[in-house]
Image: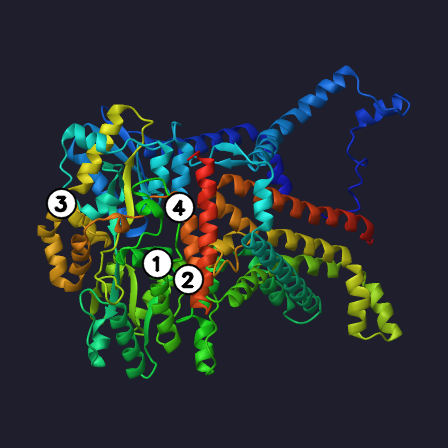
Amino acid sequence: MLKSPASNPTAGVHSADTQAKIEASEKTFSLNAKDKYYAWLFLGPSLLILGVFIFYPMFRTLYLSLFLTNTVGKPTVFVGLQNYVNLLTSADYLNSLLVTMVYVLGVTAATIVLGLLLANLASKQLAGIGIFRTLFSATMGVSVSVAAIFWLFIFNPSTGFLALMSTWLHLPVIPWLTNSTWAMIAVIITTVWMNLGFTFLILFGAIQSVPRTLYEAASIEGASSRFQFFHITIPSISPTLFFVSIVTLIEGFKSFGLIDLMTKGGPTNATNMLVYRIYKDAFYSGNFSQASAESLILTVIIALFTLLQFKVLEKRVNY
Amino acid sequence: MIAKFGTFLKKHFLPILGVIVIAIGVVFVNASHHETTAKAGRTPIVFWHEMGGPAEQALDKMVKSFNQSQDKYEVIPQYEGSYDEAVQKIIQSHGTSASPALFQSFDISTAQMMHSKYTTPVQKFIDEEHYDTSDISPVARSFYSNKGQQLALPFNTSQPVLYYNATLLKKYGITPPSKSPSYSEITRIAKQLYEKSHHQVKGMTMEIYGWLLEEALANDKTSLINHGDGHTGNPTKISVNNPNTVKFLKWIRTNIKSGDFVNYGSGASAETNEIAAFLAGKLGIFVQSSAYIGQLTTGNKNELGISYFPHPDGTKANGVGIGGAALWISNDKPEKVQKGAFEFIKYAENAKNQANWQVATGYLALNKNSQKEKVLQDLYKKIPAARVPGEQLASAKPNNANSGILMEGMQLTRELEETAMETVYNGGNINSALTTADKAMNANLQTTNKANGR
């Protein structure tokens, strides 16, 4: 979604042939019958695929969300918006909304702060910095299942690394995955650890592309490196920073694998995020109508954040 | 280098594409060939199951020996992932060419399968072939029947039992639990173990698992749901907030307060953690499925003790229900295929196969004649405690309270039970936790009834 300066929609898209046609028609653009035929030919396949795999499921979801579904998942009783009303008044669902927000914001904030810190460190010219750059981006290659199992070992209350450390230091053992507050922290830690590689890489690239001359000028003026960081680096990479935070935010909303492997939404629904809940309602409980309503609510939430991204990015692009 | 490769690609584009297409084609054809075709002259019976790990190997062996034992049918086993997800797969694929002829579906999906009307009740074949089911455990059979009609036949069956570390109890001079212990008996042992080991060993745990709560009610002869847990009519009211649930949770609360109880949470990780702690001698007692017996005896330096599921003081144990899964026959396949599916079910239930199954997996042999089989006798000689779960199963007389809950939406009900348990384990008020669960369960039940026009 990152807009590059080259992506001006009119440049480099038209072939010389169409360019000539446009000029020939004295810069007024109209489609003749043949062009329309071509337009359908080229757009048709993608429209068909979008229709079958995106639009039909979307409308089907909307349709299902207005009914109750029976044992075999068929819509039977029309209830209008009752499913939505039930959801938005149920303490359980509101709790899911709340924990999703806590998770998403926690993950985004921690990922950005840590990613920025590491990227800034790695952009210093030091001997052997290449090793650190590789290490910092290493978690990009780790799959969700591997990360979850790895951290499950660390969090294990009897034999895990953290439990052994706290026993050794005579501290109480933290019930990482069985206490509702700690479980949330545990999944946030794991997600941040997983996200860090990608975030680091993007932010590192952005910092590298800030013109060196700005720093040289600032150094001559006698600005401290801390001042340089907050007044040169941050403003220069702000579009990237915003892009990364929106991507992390949206990815956070969609988080599923990690929750399924680590907590299954528990304990006491403390990590029962929106996506995981949809899955459970549909494929465990077979309650397709409610799951459809939940899906649409989630779609609206993610659409709002995407819209925000486009609006702000358009204004804030800083070249 | 890259440019060279590019021109190479351009030059030989068609041949390369051809090779790739053929390679993919071969892989697909081989894969599908492997899965769905039977030998000439045999009727293929596609069998969906959810047995992973060692149980899958044992099941594949059973299927192979069935296929070799006759030449009319060929059973083709296909692993379908977890129990919960398989239920939806079975229902959603019904009536298509991809659907199974024979499938395994777990205990709490019974009502859903019954109401879907997608299956042929095995009673039809039992009557047609005059098959004698009396050898198969009555409490297991009653779980998968409705008003005298056998819907499916139980296959892999377990019961919750109480495991204890007999060596540790001996070491600290604590009297082991009786064969059918009461709540207070277990509390006493857990407390003594915790005190006498100077807090080095935790006394007991009870996983946050709806199944265990349901079994506690069954053992206390209490129906969770009206109309005899759904066995005498369509359920209309759930009452999880009843005195006997409170009794069960208060018992656990007592142990939590005295410090001898350890909470491992819920789900597969809880089971892994409690077993790890038990094998390491850090935990004295836990209640869990009898299917774990194999895991608890291999590599256990301590002597394993097993007793029946505990019952409240002052009452007699009613006997617990079963867990596990049953074999069902889909009704979207021709008569001949359904008959073949039933042939396999009969084969799976025979004394020899059930005995082998128990030895290989830890699930209980359902055929009472299995007990005479040599493989089981050998197992009991090696591990005397392994006899106990089978005895518990044989001792239970089926009634509505211990024949499972015949209601749809049990997955959600169980989740709500677990939320209530979690709340209590973390110090919440028992009554309010149960009231919350009650409300949500009944709201869900009403929606289900409305959606299905009942």
Residue A282: x and y in percent read 48, 43
Q: Badge 4 sits on which subunit?
A: B
Disc 2 secondary structure class: helix
Q: Amino acid at mark 3?
A: Ala
Assess whether mark 1 and mark 2 are in contact (beta carbons under 8 angstroms): yes
Mark 1, Cα crowd under 10 Å, few <14 / some 14-19 / many 20+, is many
Identify whether B255 is placed above or below B93: below
Q: Nearer the viewer, mark 2 or mark 4?
A: 2
Can residue A143 be seen? no
Say whether disc 4 or disc 1 marks the residue closer to the N-terminus. Answer: 4
Q: Amino acid at mark 2?
A: Met
The residue labelled by disc 1 is B213
| Left or right: B93 in relation to A316 | left
Say whether disc 2 or disc 1 marks the residue closer to the N-terminus. Answer: 1
Q: Nearer the viewer, mark 4 or mark 1?
A: 1
Q: Residue at x 30, y 77 (%)?
A: B191
Mark 2, Cα crowd under 10 Å, few <14 / some 14-19 / many 20+, is many
Q: Amino acid at mark 4?
A: Asp
Q: Which mark is residue B421?
A: 2
